[in-house]
Amino acid sequence: MKKKLIALVLLVVAGLVVWKIYIAPKREGVAARYREHEVTWKQVEQLRSVLSLLGEKGEADDKTLVDRILLGYILADEAKALGVTVSESEAAQSLSRIPLPDGKTTLEDYLRTLGGSLQGSMDALKQQALSTLTLDRLREALAREYCEEHDILYDVNRLPEEVSRAVDEKIDSLIESHRDEIEYFF
């Protein structure tokens, strides 16, 4: 029984290796484009690695990951239109707060143990930090704007549910509102 189980596990692993190396499509080039921004397959795989590093569980499909990268570009455009900015140093400070496994003193050390392109992983992490901070600031700006339009006193610690709901709906609609500017290549 134990030998059959080991043989089955080895067969499954061998099948996965063959699929990954020979059968799985080689993804190179551009996965999608939004305005002047291109999302490459390399970025998609880097985001998948970053999300794993950050502890996000679950296998996101390619479209979800591509849309997440596109949303970062769209958020940047929306934030820019509202005068919301995030500095490189703020993103770097955010990265310094990522919890590391025991024995790792720097993010670079940890990324080296994971293999792959250290620079690519750092770039992906930095982009994710910028997107997260931009999203936070954009949410704040949209909440302020909504409160002004509806004569609601803005207090970041006591926002009515209607403000949060309106901001969430606006953020959720961004990809859809820019759909005509997005071109997918898969």
Image: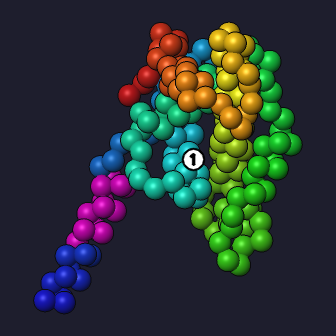
Residue drawn at the location 44% of the way across and 36% of the way down: 64
Residue range highlighted in magenta: 11-22
Residue drawn at the location 60% of the way across and 65% of the way down: 114
Residue 75 seen from this side: yes
Residue drawn at the location 78% of the way across and 56% of the way down: 96
The local crowd at label 1, few if under 14, some if 14 to 19, many if 20 or more residues have their Cα within 10 Å, is many
47 or 144: which is nearer to us?
144
Please identify the quadrant where the C terminus is shown.
Answer: top left
Percent of width and height locating residue 21: 37, 55
117 or 141: which is nearer to us?
141
Residue for badge 1: 46
Please identify the quadrant where the N terminus is shown.
Answer: bottom left
131 or 62: which is nearer to us?
131
Secondary structure at badge 1 equals helix
In this rendering, is residue 139 above or below 46? above
Percent of width and height locating residue 175: 50, 21
Quarter holding residue 156:
top right
Is residue 15 shown in magenta? yes
In this rendering, is residue 173 above or below 31? above
Residue drawn at the location 74% of the way across and 62% of the way down: 108
Percent of width and height locating residue 109: 73, 67
**Is 10 situated left or right of 145 in this image?**
left
Quarter holding residue 139:
top right
Q: Which scheme is used to colour this image of the protein?
A: rainbow
94 or 159: which is nearer to us?
159
> What type of secondary structure mainly makes up the magenta span?
helix
**Is 21 situated left or right of 170 in this image?**
left
In this rendering, is residue 78 above or below 53? above
Q: Amino acid at mark 1?
A: Gln
